[in-house]
C-alpha cells in the first residue's frame, strides 16, 4: 500500500491523503476504529458545590461533558483496565475544578477550568459554559476519564470520512468552456483560450456532484477509481491526526490478534 499526503492544515490539524491498492472495507474499518475506539479524555462526573445560574446542574454538567480536552494517552488508563479496579486513581481519573462569582454579567468559559494535569486542558478555551448575572456563582469539582466514542460521542476524537478517487474524462471540446468551469462548486476545471482543462491540484476536491454534466451533456464523463481511496481526518483537538491514526492501527492489530487466537481454540 502506498500513501500520498494531499494536505496538512497546521491550524486545524486536518489531514487528507491517498491510499493506493486498498479496499473500501479496509478504509471503513479504519474510519470506524478512529471514531468509535480511539480513546480520549472527557468529563464524566460533576459534583456541584454552588450553582445559582439560570441553568440546572444537569444542563451545566452536560455542557461540561462536551468540552474537548487535550488527551495524554501515555499517562492514563481506561478505568476498567486500571490496577485500581475502578476505584478511581491518578492513573485513570483527573480532577478539574472551577470556582467563580460574577462581579458583573459575565460568560463563564472553559478557560476558567483548573486541571490537576497541565497536559489535559480544554482545547478551545473560549467555549462558553454558562452566563452568570451579577452576584451569581458557579463552583464544581469534575472528574475526567478516558472513554470511547462507541460509549458516548463526547469521547470521539474527530470526524473521519473517505471517498474513491474521482476520474474526470473530457471526451470532446466544449462550446462554452467558461460556463462549465464556473459550474463546478470546487473549481476543478480551468478554462483557457476556449479549452477546458482539469486542474490536477483540485481534482481531489471533486465530489462528483454532476453540475458540470448539466451545462453541455456529453462533454464530460465522471467515474471513480475504486483502487485509490482519499481519506480525510478532521481532529476535534484532543489528539492529533497522527495520534488518531497510530492508535487506531494499534487497536486494529490487537483485534486481529485476538480474532486469530479465537480461531485456534
Image (cartoon, helix red, strand yellow):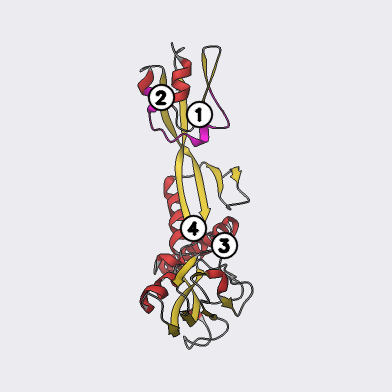
| Numbered label tally | 4
For the residues labelled 3 and 4, the Cα–Cα distance comes to 9 Å
Q: Does the residue at mark 1 contact the one at mark 3 (Cβ under 8 Å)?
A: no
Q: Which residue is mark 2?
A: 212
The kind of secondary structure element at disc 3 is loop
Residue 158, numbered circle:
4
Q: Nearer the viewer, residue 30 or 60?
A: 60
Question: How far separated are the C-alphas under marks 4 and 2?
Answer: 32 Å
Q: How far apart are labels 1 and 2 at the CA level?
A: 10 Å
Mark 2 is surrounded, within 10 Å at the Cα level, by few (under 14), some (14 to 19) or many (20 or more) other residues, namely many
Mark 1 touches mark 2? (CB < 8 Å)? yes
The answer to whether residue 201 is magenta is yes
Q: Which residue: 45% across, 28% down?
A: 184
Q: Position of residue 48 (x, y in %)?
A: 44, 84
* Whether label 3 touches label 4, CB < 8 Å: yes
Q: Is residue 226 above or below residue 51?
A: above
**Of the image marks 1 and 2, the number of the one nearer the N terminus:** 1
Residue range in magenta is 198-213
The mark that comes first in sequence, 1 or 3, is 1
Task: Give the residue at x 58% y 77%.
Answer: 114
Which disc number belongs to residue 188?
1
Residue 239, label in figure: 3
Q: Is residue 74 magenta?
A: no
SS of the residue under disc 2:
helix
Amino acid at each position: 500500500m502506498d500513501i500520498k499526503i494531499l494536505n496538512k492544515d497546521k491550524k486545524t490539524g486536518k489531514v487528507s491523503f491517498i491510499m493506493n491498492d486498498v479496499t473500501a472495507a479496509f478504509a471503513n474499518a479504519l474510519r470506524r476504529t478512529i471514531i468509535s475506539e480511539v480513546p480520549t479524555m472527557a468529563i464524566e462526573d460533576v459534583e456541584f458545590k454552588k450553582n445559582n445560574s439560570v441553568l440546572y446542574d444537569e444542563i451545566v454538567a452536560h455542557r461540561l461533558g462536551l468540552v474537548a480536552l487535550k488527551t495524554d494517552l501515555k499517562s492514563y488508563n481506561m478505568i476498567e483496565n486500571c490496577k485500581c479496579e475502578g476505584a478511581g486513581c491518578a492513573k485513570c481519573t483527573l480532577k478539574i475544578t472551577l470556582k467563580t462569582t460574577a462581579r458583573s454579567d459575565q460568560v463563564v468559559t472553559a478557560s476558567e477550568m483548573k486541571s490537576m494535569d497541565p497536559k489535559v486542558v480544554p482545547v478551545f478555551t473560549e467555549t462558553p459554559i454558562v452566563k452568570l448575572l451579577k452576584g451569581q456563582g458557579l463552583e464544581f469539582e469534575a472528574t475526567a476519564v478516558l472513554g470511547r466514542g462507541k460509549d458516548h460521542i463526547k469521547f470521539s476524537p474527530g470526524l473521519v470520512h473517505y471517498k474513491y478517487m474521482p476520474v474526470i474524462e473530457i471526451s470532446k471540446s466544449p462550446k462554452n468552456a467558461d460556463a462549465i468551469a464556473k459550474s463546478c462548486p470546487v473549481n476543478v476545471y480551468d478554462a483557457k483560450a476556449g479549452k477546458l482543462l482539469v486542474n490536477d491540484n483540485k481534482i481531489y476536491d471533486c465530489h462528483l456532484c454532476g453540475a458540470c454534466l448539466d451545462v453541455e451533456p456529453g462533454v464530460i464523463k465522471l467515474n471513480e477509481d475504486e483502487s485509490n481511496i482519499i481519506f480525510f481526518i478532521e481532529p476535534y483537538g484532543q489528539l492529533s491526526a497522527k495520534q488518531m491514526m497510530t492508535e487506531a492501527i494499534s487497536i486494529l492489530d490487537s483485534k486481529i490478534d485476538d480474532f486469530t487466537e479465537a480461531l485456534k481454540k
